[in-house]
């Protein structure tokens, strides 16, 4: 069975939620519905088999596993941005 590759959209939703600690605010920043952000986070948690946030009503706090993933996510998203910038030099 091939390894499951992490979805960049889920990682972006995760990083945004980790920063703002609100599904509503994360959805607003990403121009998504709150439900879409929730599904992205649940999907990422399912993919990884760990809980990334503790949910307390409308507020969320990141778990230890989430903090560790956030370190990786920051690097991944930065590298993706750098790749896009590098490729812009070859654009039309």
Image: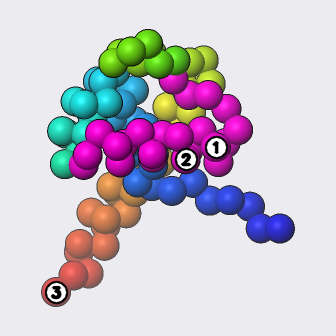
Tell me the magenta residue range: 32-53
Residue located beneath label 1 in the image: 46
Label 2 and label 1: CA atoms lie apart by: 5 Å
Can residue 21 be seen here? Answer: yes
Residue 35 x %, y % = 34, 43
Mark 3 is surrounded, within 10 Å at the Cα level, by few (under 14), some (14 to 19) or many (20 or more) other residues, namely few
Left or right relative to 80: residue 20: left
Question: In the picture shown, does residue 31 fall above or below 26?
Answer: below
Residue located beneath label 2 in the image: 43
**In front: 8, or 39?**
39
Question: In the picture shown, does residue 76 fall above or below 3?
Answer: above
The C terminus - image quarter:
bottom left
The residue positioned 62% from the left and 59% from the top of the image is: 5
Mark linked to residue 60: none
The answer to whether mark 2 and mark 1 are in CB contact below 8 A is: yes
The residue positioned 31% from the left and 65% from the top of the image is: 84
Tell which tag, 3 or 1, sits nearer the viewer.
Answer: 1
- Secondary-structure class at tag 2: helix
Left or right relative to 80: residue 45: right
The residue positioned 52% from the left and 18% from the top of the image is: 54
Q: Quadrant of residue 82?
A: bottom left
Label 3 and label 2: CA atoms lie apart by: 36 Å
The residue positioned 70% from the left and 38% from the top of the image is: 49
């Amino acid at each position: 069975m091939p390894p499951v590759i992490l979805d960049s959209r889920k990682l972006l939703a995760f990083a945004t939620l980790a920063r703002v600690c609100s599904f509503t605010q994360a959805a607003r920043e990403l121009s998504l519905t709150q439900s879409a952000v929730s599904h992205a986070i649940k999907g990422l948690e399912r993919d990884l088999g760990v809980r990334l946030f503790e949910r307390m009503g409308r507020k969320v706090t990141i778990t230890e596993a989430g903090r560790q993933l956030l370190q990786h996510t920051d690097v991944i998203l930065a590298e993706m941005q750098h790749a896009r910038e590098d490729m812009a030099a070859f654009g039309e």
